[in-house]
Image: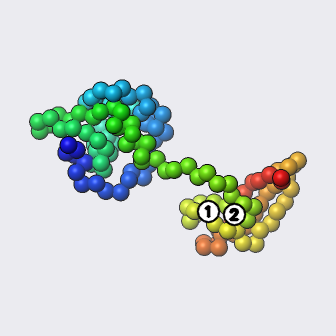
Amino acid sequence: MNGIGMNKRQPIAWIPHRVIARAPSLLPMLYTMREITEELGIPKGTLRGWLAHGAPCRLEGKNRVWIHGQEFTAWVDRQRKPKRQEKLSDDQAYCLRCNQVVQLSAIEKRPIKGKLVHFKGRCPNCGAVINRGGRLD
């Protein structure tokens, strides 16, 4: 039973890299909240927030919370954003204002050194200037 995480909300927006790196080292055993926070190097309040957002846990009595190490590791992996596999074409770039891949408009292509190329263009959504590096193939 997942007593604390009964009200499942949106996935956690951000999990620190140290938690992503340290979580696979958790053993297949039950941990207390204090042991998990010490093992992962996070504040207790952060862990409580994650438990409220659906991290797996077991309640014993009224105040005792147990967290299974491998179930918690699997939950951390599910919270991560999937890696983008496809490469961007020469007329595409990632807009930091829009937080998405966009088709550049008014592209300027300038060779830098060897096979390196500098692309400069504008985001069609917000109009921001986007700089991107690339290679000549």
Q: Is residue 45 visible?
A: no
Name the one closer to the observer, 63 or 85: 85
As shown in the figure, which amino acid type bears the numbered disc 1?
A: Val
**Residue denoted by label 1:** 101
Mark 2: give few (<14), some (14-19) or many (20+) Cα within 10 Å.
some
Does residue 16 appear to the left or right of 53 in the view shown? right
Q: Where does residue 135 sit, x and y in percent of width and height?
A: 80, 52
As shown in the figure, which amino acid type bears the numbered disc 2?
A: Gln
**Residue denoted by label 2:** 92
Residue in the image at 72% along x and 60% along y = 89
Does residue 1 appear to the left or right of 110 in the view shown? left
Name the one closer to the observer, 51 or 82: 82
Q: Looking at this view, name the residue that lies furthest to the left.
A: 61
Callout 1: SS: strand
Q: Quadrant of residue 67?
A: top left
* Label disc, if present, on residue 7 of the rendered structure: none
Mark 1: give few (<14), some (14-19) or many (20+) Cα within 10 Å.
few
Residue in the image at 60% along x and 73% along y = 125
Q: Can residue 132 be seen in this view?
A: yes
Determine contact: label 1, label 2, CB under 8 Å: yes
Q: Where does residue 64 sit, x and y in percent of width and height?
A: 17, 34
